[in-house]
Image (cartoon, rainbow, N blue to C red):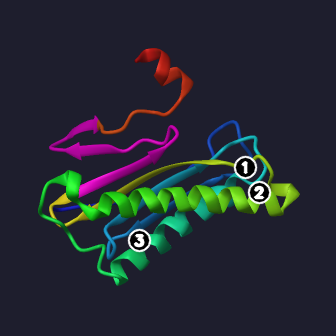
Amino acid sequence: MNVTARGISDVGRKREHNEDSLLIDDALGLYIVADGMGGHQGGGTASRLAVETIRESLRAAKADGAGVPHQGPLEENPLREVLRSAVERACRSIFQAAQTDPGLQGMGTTVSVLLVAGSRWLIGQVGDSRIYLLRDGALTQLTKDHSYVQEQVG
């Protein structure tokens, strides 16, 4: 599988600062976009913590041998649990940081993670940051937003 990853972030027209974090780690096959919640204190801190925590969790799993590509059924792939645990660990890390620093209370972030392992890939997502596939000039949205609007759409 040939993966080409690029990242760019833009503050947009409504905000004065950017709360996004992104990661392109070809060695781990790990690609992350995290969008700190605008209007909340510490959105940039939350997005950075999410990216750093997930990356470190997956590095540790690879060092322990859990990051080895699995060719069996996807339901039995140990990387599913590794990725789920990494995202949950990031959530806990953000929550704990917000509890210890009053200036960070209420911070949050979305996160979308793509983990490429051999010829397979796994996605982890929280919120409304999206993952798309560009193949042969066609763009396909692979994830659905975790949002009130998406719930109403179906």
Q: Secondary structure at mark 1?
A: loop
Q: Residues within 10 Å of mark 3 (few under 14, many from 20)?
A: many
Mark 1 to mark 2 CA distance (whole Å): 7 Å
Q: Secondary structure at mark 2?
A: helix
Mark 1 is on which residue type?
A: Met
Residue 63 in view of the camera:
yes
Let me know if residue 137 is in the magenta part: yes
**Residue corresponding to mark 3:** 58
Q: Is residue 70 above or below residue 42?
A: below
Total marks placed: 3
Let me know if residue 30 is in the magenta part: no
Magenta highlight range: 121-140
Percent of width and height locating residue 6: 38, 59
Q: Mark 1 or mark 3, which is nearer the start of the sequence? A: 3
The circle on residue 107 is 1
Q: Residue at x 19, y 41 (%)?
A: 137
